[in-house]
Structures are given as C-alpha cells and as structure tokens.
Image: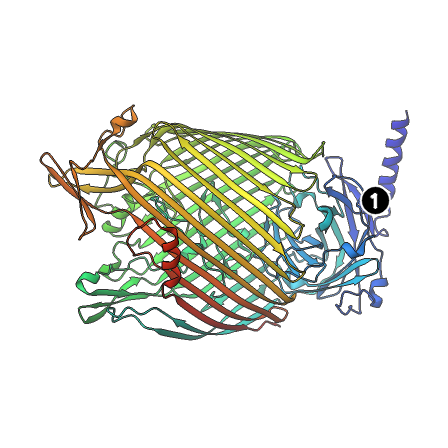
C-alpha cells in the first residue's frame, strides 16, 4: 500500500513537471529503462560575458543554475561527494557555459596544466548531440588548470581526441573550489536548420583525487548507447543562418641535414623547402560543411614507431594528420579488421621505386611520400536523419632520380592519383535503426611501362544495416562488401599472387592464376546478432567472410581474403562495487576459420578478466589457446602448413592514474610444446608528474622470440623445382620510449618524444619444408645440416647441395638499430592560430653485419650520422 502511494505520488510529480515544462529550467523525463533523463532549458542573452573564468558578468544572473550531479563512478547513482552547478546561455553566434565546481577541500584540487586535448587533473565538461541523432556528441572539456580538451564521442562511448574545434575557455580558483567559463561558436557544431533546436546534452565532472566521475544526467555504465542516454537541451530558438566561412593559411620553412654517402652522387648534405598552403571550411546551408586543404604539410605530427615486420602482411599505422582525423566518423566503414577507407593511402610512399645496386654503381633517390595537391570533403546531416559524406583527394606524380655509373635520368615512381569516397547513412525509428552505403574509387594515370604493375582503377562498395531490438536489449548488424580492381595483366597478376590472395597455392584447387586477367572482383561481409551492453551478461554470434578475390588495399586496408569466420563471445560486466572491487568483467570467445575451399584453418579460445580495485588500481589477465590448424599464408604462396597447438598468457597492471607517480606493467608469454618454441615480452611504464606543468614518462620493453620454424625464402633449384626454406629464429627486441611535456601556459608547450629501437635476429637449424601436411612435426621438413649446407661469406648467402639438387638463398640474419625523436614547441597565439617549431631526428644503422652484443648495438646506433629536420610553421585562423 505504501509503495502504491509512492508510485502514485511519483506519477503526479512527473505530470506536474511536464505540464509546467515551458516555465521550468530543469526538469525530468522518464526513459524506457526507468531511469530519468534530465532536461535543461536555456535562455538567450543580449550582453555576452567576458571569458575569464570568474563568472562575475551580469548575464550569469539570467536563468537558473542546474545542479544535483550524481556519481557514475565509483558508486553508480550515489550522491556526488562535491557539489557542481551548471548554466547554459546563448546568443546568435555562441553558446556560453558556466560551471561552479565546489570543493570542501580546495587545496586538494588537481589543477595541472596539460597539452591541448590532454585530460589531466580535475576536469569539467559538456557534450552536445546537436543533431539529436543519438550517434555523435561534440564534447568540450576544460581542466582546472585551464587546458582545453575537445572530443568527438560516438554512441559506443569511444572518444576521438583528434577532432579540434575553435573555442575558448578559462578557469579560476576560488576559496570554495573552482569555476569555469566556456564560449563555443555555433559554427563549430553541426545541427539542423529548425526554428527551435532540441539537442542531446551531457555534462560531467572528474574529481581526480577520488577517481570520481559525477554526471548531470546519469548514464549507466551498462547502457544501450552512450549518446542515446544523454539528457536534453531545449530553448535555443530562431538562430540566424550560419555562414561558417573559415580560412587557415599557413607558411612553412624546412631545412634538412642528411648523412652523406661519398660514393653516392645523389646524396646531399642539406636540402630545404619553403611552401605555403591553406585549410578551410565553408558552410553549405545549415546542414553541410565543406572542408578543404591545399598543398598540406603535416611535418608537426609525431613520427611512426619503428617496426621490424617479419610477416607477409603490411604494418598498420594510425592516422595522425589533422585533416583526415577531423570529422572522420562519417567515413568509417570497418568490417572486423578490414577498412574500406584507410586514409594513410593518401600521401603514401611511392609504389614503384626501382632497386638500387651499389655494386654496379646504381643509385636511386625518391621522395619519402607522395605530395597531396588538394583534398576536399563535404559532410553533414539533414533534418530527416540522412548523413552524407564525400571526400576527394589528388596526389601528384613522383619521379625517382637514378644515377647509373654517372648517367643520370628519371623514371616515374608514382602516378597522378585521384581518390573519391561517398558515404550515406539514414537513421530512423528514433535512432534504433540505420541503413547506409559507401562507395570508393581510386584512379591512377598509368602512362609509363614503369607503372604497369600498379592498378589503374579500383572500386569498392558496401552496405550496412543496424537494428536495436526489444528496447535495445538486443541488436542485429549486417555489412556487405564488394570490390573490383582493373589494370594491365601484369598488375592483376601481381595482385593475384600478393599476400592478401596467394592464388598460386599449389594445394588450393579452387583457385587458379590467370595471367591474362585485367579485372579482379570479390565480395565479403559480416552478420552479427547479440545482446547489448544494457545487460550485465552480453553475447554476440558473428559470421564473417571474404571471397578470394576481395581487394580493398588501393584506398582501404586488408590483410587477407579467402576466409569464413564463425565466432561466439560472452561477457559479464559487474559495475556495483563489491568488497575490494569497484567493477569487474569476464569474457569468453571461441573462433573457427575456414577458407573457401572448405579447409579448416584454425580454432581458438580466449578467456579474459578485468578488475578495477577500490584503490583505483586496475588489472587484466587473459589466456589464449590455439587448437591447431592449417596456415595457408606461412609459406608465402606455397601449400598450407599444418600448425600445432600453442598457449598464450598475458597480463596488464597499473596503479592509480591520478597519483603523481604511476606504474604500469604489460607482459605475455607463449609456448608450443611440439616445436619447442616460445616467446615473451615484458613492458614496464613509469609516469611522473613532477609539477602542475611538467610531466615525464618512460616505457621500456624487452621481447624474445624463439621459434623453431620461421619462413626464410622460396627458391627454385637447378631442376626448376620450388623449394620452401625455414629455420629456427632467435630474436630479441629492445624498445625505449621517452616523453616529456612542459606547459608554460595552456596555450604554450614544449613536447619531446624519443624512441631508440634495437632488434637482432639469428637464423639457424635451416630446414627444407618438404611435407607441410605431415601429422608429425618432425616429418614436415628435411633438416639442412652441414652435410648439405654451406655459407658463402663473400656473397652473404647459403648454398644447398643435396644429391643432384642445388639451390641458394640469402642470409636472413638481421640487425636493425633505429632512433626517432621529435621536439615540438607549440604556441596557440590566438584561438585556432598556431606557431610550431619542430626538430625531428632519425638515426639508423640497419645494414651492419649481425652480432648479438646489446652494448655494441647501442654504441653503433648513437654513433651513426642521423637526419635532422628543422621546421617553422605558422598558420592563421580567420572566421568570416
């Protein structure tokens, strides 16, 4: 009876709140899950505030402060330990946001000054789903030290810190805590042209010393969509049409100091470059924005990490260039690890570079990357939920300069290339359903025999459909792919024999090489059904497939085709603190793989667990079991090799990230009993906050690989028979990464990154793989001992003479030493306008003979003459 009265009273309060909605400035709306979503009603002002963080302007007396934040972590739904107040106002051009962050112990507020987009110390922020499509949120955060952090957040809660808006914010410390004041231009947001705006809105506060996140409208950690769970912002009315015309011209000067090879007539001690370019944005109506870049230069971005890739597959590198990062969510179309648009293809290293031959005095010089002449993208969303994205980029011709015994000439190294991408996606059913499509094209101007092995044209396409079911407790997701690549017969022949396809495999009777083919077509897809993160216990059942001819690598990223995967996964996630745990999760996965010939390639199991302790330490452990199978890629186009089972164990541990000193450790160990193979890696990391302005971090890793059977080479003997050579590999890898950051102000900083990398590989116990499918491990190969094998030191190669058969292969031992570093001074002298000074250094000594001495390797590395690049870059932001 009492509960019935309580329920009736709650219903009465609910109807009263909604009936008085036009007057109330902060009310509630009940969601389907029984949790409330708060509603904030903003007001227009005529006299804007001076952004200084002090909140003493007259406009802040307009309207009502909203408060009653609640904890999301550590105790979901509990009362916040500290009081927070929020106010949102607007005029024709800007949204103004104010926060009062009260603190009963103001001396414990962590007001660190960090780099742009670095969350350090105490933080407060606001996030707008300005399209109100429950998919994308534009988040504006400010630390207690005054550093700005803008983030693009997707419905799965994953942040994209690469999105950068032009806005201002200031903070001030007070006797009762700290305050923050933000000024956000409407031009930095995407919204529909309507008389009255209704947006999703989320606000949060991070109290670093408690590792406590407080939220204005609670988003449960077990939710069916992060953006979907936002509260609402109402009251923005009659906005004038936004012009959104932005220009950012830049000028750049670069000087390079390079090591000189006395024997190479093409080497130059100094090279220099002066250039100008421009980035810009142009509003197309109220729904769409055109972004463009002319003659871009990205010299200020951090160098890629060093890598020694012994696999047949291309290394994946993350995108770091601002133009391709900002607003990229509309162009994303991934199917598992395959990507239809991999923006690093634009401006890649030249694809057709002739080999140098120093023994015959043939030297080659070519640019490290193709020049991007221009790039344009149009993106936006209509009022009825149709998202559209179009991207075009043009890269110029590149030539390799060749000096052959004193005769100098040029040959094409990369053609003029145009890339196009089209993406549409339609949301409906209140954001519970979406359907979309993507289409890409790559066209190369193949006008010289040196380029005939490059694809002339490539087309890829895909469709996707997503559906939430049963109040977002379940979901269904399907994606389909298609590709068609065209070129001269030699280009398509190369493609058929590449690592992604290996049509030449002698035991793959369902595949065949066609040397006259001028087009290669393929298809793929994924079907997924599961229970969402709205539940503690989740599951997914997934089927993925790629036909043998699917090819995405002209503008996308794909390691291999020709497989069918079936996976089931289970996850239990508990967010209610119990005992010494704040939260924990346990996962299980089982995966099978077949190829299109029906051959079972692999089966594996993964069990993992995550623990977040009450002292804010975190740990993860995992176990992976490979049950055995057939590896169709190991012999690089040869027959499938039978693989025996192995185990892999791993762990991660870190202390409280809010403390001045933080330690973390990653480690793994793998072993295969049958082949007496194993590997391990240990990677400790230390973070030091020496002051509110200075932070240091170091990460060291050591890895040893001891594999009894590694691929070495495929050779043809003197009887024209193909031989597959393997060996035991003993490899050791050392890597050290150092970072330092010193912030004079939130807008002026020094940053340093340095990473020495050393790896040594010794091949021994050579083997000829003669029976790759034998059930017994030792029966799969013929050992090549000293009876058959001799080493020619002068030519650095091995020769095999067995009975009436002879063949040769190069010495595969390697020794790579490399050091890469960047020093960057960054000064944002006005919002959106930045001055850079960059010093980049790279030293490598990878051609020296193999040896196992680490001390000697370090000495050799730092005694090498490196390349030093000095760069000045200035851009200026104009908003018309």
Helix, strand or loop at mark 1:
helix
Can you see residue 318?
no
Which of these two is toward me, 450 or 857? 857
Can you see residue 577?
yes
Classify mark 1: residues with Cα within 10 Å, few (<14), some (14-19) or many (20+).
some
Horizontally, is 193 left or right of 451 in the view? right
Q: Quadrant of the N terminus?
A: top right
Horizontally, is 466 left or right of 521 in the view? right
Which of these two is toward me, 319 or 777? 777
Q: Position of residue 438 (x, y in %)?
A: 47, 48
Q: How is the image coloured?
A: rainbow
Which of these two is toward me, 542 or 831? 831
Q: What residue sits 49% from the left and 50% below the top?
A: 700
Horizontally, is 461 left or right of 771 in the view? right
Q: Position of residue 359 (x, y in %)?
A: 18, 61
- Tell me which corner region of the image, top left, top right, bottom left or bottom right, holds residue 221: top right
Residue that carries the numbered disc 1 in the rendered image: 18
Q: What residue sits 33% from the left and 60% below the top?
A: 350
Note whether 229 is above or below 40 in the view shown.
above
Horizontally, is 655 left or right of 489 in the view? right
Q: Position of residue 849 (x, y in %)?
A: 28, 53
Note whether 604 is above or below 447 in the view shown.
above
How many numbered marks does the figure carry?
A: 1
Q: Quadrant of the C terminus?
A: bottom right
Q: What residue sits 90% from the left and 27% below the top?
A: 2
Q: Position of residue 205 (x, y in %)?
A: 73, 51
């Amino acid at each position: 009876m009492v509960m019935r009265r309580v329920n009736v009273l709650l219903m009465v309060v609910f109807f009263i709140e909604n009936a008085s909605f036009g007057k109330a400035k902060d009310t509630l709306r009940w969601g389907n899950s029984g949790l409330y979503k708060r509603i904030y009603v903003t007001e227009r002002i005529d006299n804007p505030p001076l952004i200084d963080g002090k909140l003493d302007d007259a406009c802040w007396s307009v309207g009502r402060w909203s408060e009653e934040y609640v904890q999301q972590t550590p105790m979901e739904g509990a009362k916040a330990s500290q009081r927070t107040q929020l106010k949102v106002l607007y005029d024709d051009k800007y949204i103004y946001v104010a926060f009062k962050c009260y603190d009963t112990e103001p001396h414990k507020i962590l007001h660190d000054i960090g780099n742009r987009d670095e969350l350090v110390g105490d933080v407060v922020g606001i996030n707008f789903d300005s399209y109100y499509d429950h998919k994308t949120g534009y988040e504006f955060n400010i630390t207690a030290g005054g550093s700005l952090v803008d983030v693009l957040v997707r419905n799965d809660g994953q942040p994209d810190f690469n999105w950068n808006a032009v806005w201002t914010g200031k903070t001030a410390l007070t006797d009762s805590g700290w305050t923050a004041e933000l000024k956000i231009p409407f031009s930095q947001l995407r919204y529909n042209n309507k008389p009255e705006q209704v947006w999703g809105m989320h606000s949060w506060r991070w109290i670093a010393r408690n590792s406590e996140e407080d939220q204005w409208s609670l988003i449960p950690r077990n939710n069916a969509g992060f953006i979907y769970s936002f509260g609402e912002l109402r009251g923005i009315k009659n906005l004038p049409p936004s012009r959104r015309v932005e220009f950012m011209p830049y000028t750049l000067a670069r000087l390079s100091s390079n090591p000189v090879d006395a024997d190479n007539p093409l080497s130059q001690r100094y090279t220099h470059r002066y250039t100008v370019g421009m980035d810009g944005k142009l509003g197309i109506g109220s729904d769409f924005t055109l972004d463009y870049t002319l003659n871009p230069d990205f010299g200020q971005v951090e160098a890629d990490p060093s890598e020694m890739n012994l696999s047949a597959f291309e290394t994946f590198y993350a995108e770091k260039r601002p133009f391709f990062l900002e607003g990229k969510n509309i162009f994303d179309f991934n199917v598992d690890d395959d990507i239809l648009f991999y923006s690093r293809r634009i401006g890649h290293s030249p694809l057709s570079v002739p080999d140098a031959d120093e023994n015959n005095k043939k030297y080659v010089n070519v640019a490290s990357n193709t020049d991007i002449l221009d790039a344009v993208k149009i993106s936006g969303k209509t009022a009825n939920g149709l998202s559209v994205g179009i991207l075009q980029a043009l890269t110029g011709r590149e030539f390799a300069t060749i000096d052959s015994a004193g005769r100098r000439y040029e040959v094409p190294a990369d053609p003029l290339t145009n890339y196009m991408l089209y993406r549409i996606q339609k949301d409906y059913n209140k954001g519970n359903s979406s359907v979309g499509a993507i289409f890409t094209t790559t066209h190369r101007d193949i006008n010289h025999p040196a380029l005939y092995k490059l694809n002339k044209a490539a087309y890829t396409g895909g469709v996707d459909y997503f559906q939430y079911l049963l109040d977002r407790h379940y979901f269904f997701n399907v994606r389909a792919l298609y590709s068609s690549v065209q070129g001269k017969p030699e280009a398509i022949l190369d493609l058929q024999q590449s690592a992604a396809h290996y049509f030449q495999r002698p035991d793959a009777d369902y595949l065949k090489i066609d040397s006259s083919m001028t087009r290669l077509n393929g298809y793929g897809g994924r079907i997924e059904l599961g229970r969402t993160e709205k539940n503690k216990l989740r599951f997914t059942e997934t089927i993925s497939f790629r036909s043998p001819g699917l090819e995405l690598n002209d503008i996308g990223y794909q390691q291999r085709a020709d497989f069918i995967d079936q996976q089931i996964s289970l996850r239990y996630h508990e967010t209610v603190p119990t005992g010494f745990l704040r939260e924990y999760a346990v996962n299980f996965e089982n995966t099978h793989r077949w190829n299109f010939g029906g051959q079972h390639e692999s089966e594996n199991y993964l069990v993992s667990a995550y623990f977040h302790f009450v002292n804010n330490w975190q740990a993860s452990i995992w176990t992976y079991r490979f049950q055995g199978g057939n590896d169709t890629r190991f012999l690089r186009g040869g027959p499938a090799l039978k693989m025996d089972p192995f185990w892999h164990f791993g762990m991660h541990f870190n202390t409280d990230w809010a403390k001045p000193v933080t330690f973390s450790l990653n480690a793994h160990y793998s072993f295969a009993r049958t082949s007496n193979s194993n590997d391990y890696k240990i990677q400790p990391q230390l973070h030091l906050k020496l002051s509110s302005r200075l932070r240091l971090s170091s990460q060291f890793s050591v890895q040893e690989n001891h594999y009894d059977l590694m691929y070495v080479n495929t050779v043809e003997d003197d009887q024209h028979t193909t031989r597959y050579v393997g060996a035991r590999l003993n490899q050791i890898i050392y890597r050290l990464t150092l970072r330092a950051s010193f912030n004079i102000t939130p807008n002026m900083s020094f940053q340093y990154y340095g990473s020495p990398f050393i790896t040594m590989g010794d091949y021994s116990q050579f083997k000829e793989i003669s029976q790759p499918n034998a059930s017994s491990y030792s029966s799969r190969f013929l050992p090549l001992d000293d009876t058959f094998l001799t080493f020619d030191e002068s030519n650095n190669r091995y020769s095999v003479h067995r009975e009436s058969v002879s063949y040769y292969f190069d010495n595969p031992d390697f020794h790579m030493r490399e050091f890469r570093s960047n020093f960057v001074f960054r000064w944002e002298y006005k919002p959106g306008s930045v001055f850079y000074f960059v010093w980049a250094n790279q030293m490598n000594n990878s051609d020296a003979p193999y040896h196992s001495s680490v001390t000697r390797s370090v000495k050799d590395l730092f005694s090498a003459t490196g390349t030093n690049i000095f760069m000045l870059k200035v851009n200026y932001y104009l908003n018309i």
